[in-house]
Image: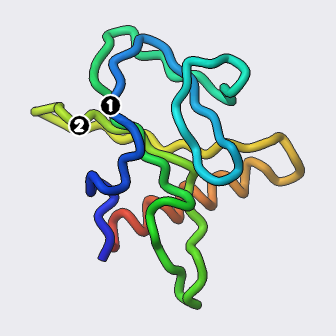
Amino acid sequence: MCDFFDPKYQTEASRTDTEFGIGDDGRMSFTTIEEKDTITVVKNPAGISLQFVPVDHNIPIKNESGGEASLCDAMIYTPFAIERKDIYFIELKDRSKNWISEALDQLKSTIHYLHNE
C-alpha cells in the first residue's frame, strides 16, 4: 500500500507564491520561479499554501505485471485546508501524436492507484 500524501514523497516545501512554474528535467518534475525551466504556470492569486509532489518516478507503484505504473507527472494539493482538500493532477506533454489520449490515460491511472492503494 502506498500513501500519496506521505511526507517522504514531498521533495520541496509547500508554496504560497501567487505564481510559479512547473518544470521536468526528465527524471522528476519540480516547481520553479525560473522562466527558462517552466513548462506550465500555476496561478495562486489568494496565495494559499500548496504542496507540490512529484508522482512519476517518485511514488513507487507497480502495475499488474510488476513494472512501473504509468502515472501523471505531479500533483498539487492544499495541505492545510480544514473543510476540504483540493487535489490537482498534472501531466506535462509535448504536443506529439496522441498526446491528449496518453495524458488522459496517465491521469486516470494515477487516480485509480490513489483510490486503490
Give the CA distance from mark 2 to mark 1: 8 Å
- Between residues 16 and 105, which one lies in front from this camera angle? 16
Residue beneath label 1, please? 14
Q: Number of marks in the image?
A: 2
Residue at 48% over, 16% down = 43
Please state the horizontal and vertical placement of residue 46, each as a whole percent of the image. 32, 10
Question: Looking at the image, is mark 2 or mark 1 earlier in the sequence?
Answer: 1
Instruction: Name which residue type carries label 2.
Output: Pro
Looking at this view, name the residue that lies furthest to the left: 82
Residues tagged 2 and 1 counted as in contact (Cβ below 8 A): yes
* Residue 79, disc: 2
- 37 left or right, relative to 7: right
Q: Secondary structure at mark 2?
A: loop
**Label 1 crowd bin: few (<14), some (14–19), many (20+), radius 10 Å:** some
- Check the image and report above or below for 86 versus 74: above
- 85 left or right, relative to 46: left
Please state the horizontal and vertical placement of residue 105, each as a whole percent of the image. 63, 61
